[in-house]
Image (cartoon, rainbow, N blue to C red):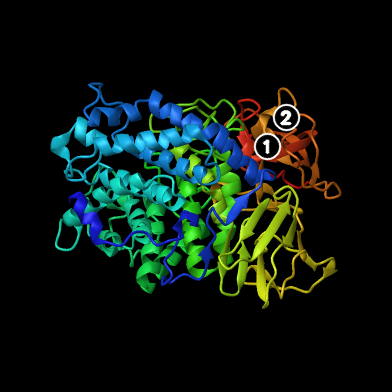
Amino acid sequence: MTQQKLSDTAPAAPGLEAAGPVTPTPGALSALRPLGLGQARLGAGGLLGRWRRRNAEATLPHCVDNLHGSGNIGNLRAAAGESGDEFAGMWFADSDVHKTLEAAAWQLATSPEDAGLRSFVDGTTALLARAQRADGYLNSYFTVVAPQERWARPDWSHELYCAGHLFQAAVAAARTGVSPDLLTVARRFADLLVERFGPDGVEEVCGHPEVETALAELYRVTGHRPYLDLARRFLDLRGRGLLGHGRFGPRYYQDHQPVREVREVTGHAVRQLYLLAGMVDVAVETGDLALLDAAERLWADAFRSRTYVTGAHGSRHREEAYGDPYELPPDRAYGETCAAIASFQWNWRLLLATGRARYADEMERVLYNAVAAAVSSDGRHFFYSNPLHLRTGHASTGEEAAARRLPWYSCACCPPNIARLMASLPGYLSTADDGGLQIHLYGDASLTTPDGRRVEMRTDYPWQGRVELAVTSEADAPWTLALRVPAWCAAYTVSVDGEPVRAPVRDGYVRVTRAWRPGATVVLDLEMPVRQVAAHPRVDAVRGCVALARGPLVYCLEQADLPPGTVLEDVRLDPAAPAVPITPGDREDLPDVPVVLTARGLVADAGDSLYTAGPRRERTGTPLTLTAVPYFLWGNRSEGPMRVWIPVAAAG
């Protein structure tokens, strides 16, 4: 379609510049309204604030540098006819440019003075406009390398996947006011998709879902209904086997059964989770309860039997895929970083749609464990896969077999995905409705609802469970402050202005209603005892093991904390020492870890024979004190074995 087509629709509604990454329209089937980056501000203190600052100072500039160094930007220059260089990288390399653009837009919403990021956004947007074809098509691989294959391989090409990430970057740029020109580029491409795939158009779906959620968000920004209708059409077409059998079969693409009828999550985990996010977006905007019910049904399947204790998804390396129910081997866990991020995004959409705390609980779990583990303490090295056990003698066989974080990948989807999530993190903290303010993730932050309610939040969470809130606005009528009590928390207290109040948990939240006055304070204290977590006995791979957790954090053992010569796989938790509790401790050699865990353990000796006749008997060995560190920090001090699931020594 031509540029003139854009004038047929209304411009974005005023006020969207304050919006965050997911913003349902006023008429959507949505229980909660998210606060945007203009209304939720993370402070410099606290773990979430430090992560976002590290992202701005290290991860995001690192991604920009690597887009230039790895050829992604050069590919676009070649597509624009400004270079004769050969195409570099994966055929979907444009998507990494788009994700980094999205991250830059979210960051510029709160750091408008960052001239380097501004230059990247402006320069790259102009380059995309020059690389775009006359009909709106934009994909450097199929422009430079294989123009004859344009639209020819929907199972393989990632053309719509790349388009989706372009649309999401444009949404971020529009909502933050960073670059209206990027929205123009994106809409030219989106109009081409409507023309080709819309009503009575080509019946195809993308082998890698993602465009569905992007089109829904583009509709939310522009008000142009054909974008939402196309997203729904793609969902309605999926499950007809349009993608063929391919290398791994239609289940790999989630193309084996109509989306409203599917009973279990299947196939490539990232694709499945992005598809589910799109299902929720379309459901709430169209009032399609059957579609929303299907997404919740698949949530139950995923989280009852196919999700790791860290919140990671995907147990099979071969297909980057979900396995059978309870197939969750810790050492062979794939747990791709992009799947963890997609799970976070899907759960956020379900939380907005339903208001159910279980979705916020999963956001917290995956953020503090699977997502956080994927980036190093310096912000410039990354895991692609995220195992829960790295064996002694592990031999890395490729980029995705995690033994250490790498600065970049040949398939570099994860680093810019981390960058865009961390840059947009304030947009996931809290929501509002007509009755008040809901806080889902805890951190140092300033929160302001659209109707002027203001709260300052201070906390050392997740290291401590005390969350202090100060109301800084005056209200003429009562309103409710709702605070999530995580499912892991068995006991808590609430006080207002120093006086205890009785506030029972209802639907996962404590709710305090007042006609608030400036200076009112609320303190939520969540008890954080150390927990020993056991898996369902059908998870054969970790039967007889426990994982240590405290608050939202899962902990692990590392070789670095064992005596020299001790083999990690020989270490056991000692059940015969109930008087020695597993307690928080301090370590001078771990200055960035306020809380480590210590436990009584022992080294078992099972002999040298690989197999024995009858049950194997282990001989009790040397007792030792075990130190467990947060899983998200493993591999930062040194390379070496690690495990989350710890065998418990046989009693007696």
Q: Nearer the viewer, residue 553 or 517?
A: 517
Query: In the displayed image of the protein, which residue is found farthest to the bottom?
Result: 477
Residue at the (43%, 45%) spot, across then down: 178
Disc with the residue nearer the chain's start (2 vs 1): 1
Residue at the (73%, 60%) spot, across then down: 469
Say which amino acid is labelled 1. Answer: Leu
Q: Position of residue 401 (x, y in %)?
A: 47, 32
Q: Nearer the viewer, residue 151 or 1?
A: 1
Please tell me whether mark 1 sits on a helix, a strand or a loop.
strand
Few, some or many residues within 10 Å of mark 2 (<14, 14–19, 20+): some
- The disc at residue 557 is 1
Q: Position of residue 250 (x, y in %)?
A: 27, 52
Would you name the residue on which mark 2 appears?
562
Q: Is residue 359 left or right of residue 74?
A: right
- In whole angstroms, how far apart are the C-alphas of marks 2 and 1? 8 Å
Q: Quadrant of residue 238?
A: bottom left
Q: Is residue 186 left or right of residue 242?
A: right
Residue at the (57%, 31%) spot, across then down: 610
Residue at the (64%, 34%) spot, across then down: 569
Count of number-bearing discs: 2
Residue 485 in view in this figure = yes
Q: Is residue 111 left or right of residue 293?
A: right
| Residue 126 higher or lower than 313, as above or below | above
Say which amino acid is labelled 2. Answer: Leu
Q: Is residue 593 left or right of residue 394?
A: right
Few, some or many residues within 10 Å of mark 1 (<14, 14–19, 20+): many
Please tell me whether mark 2 sits on a helix, a strand or a loop.
loop
| Cβ–Cβ under 8 Å for marks 2 and 1 | yes
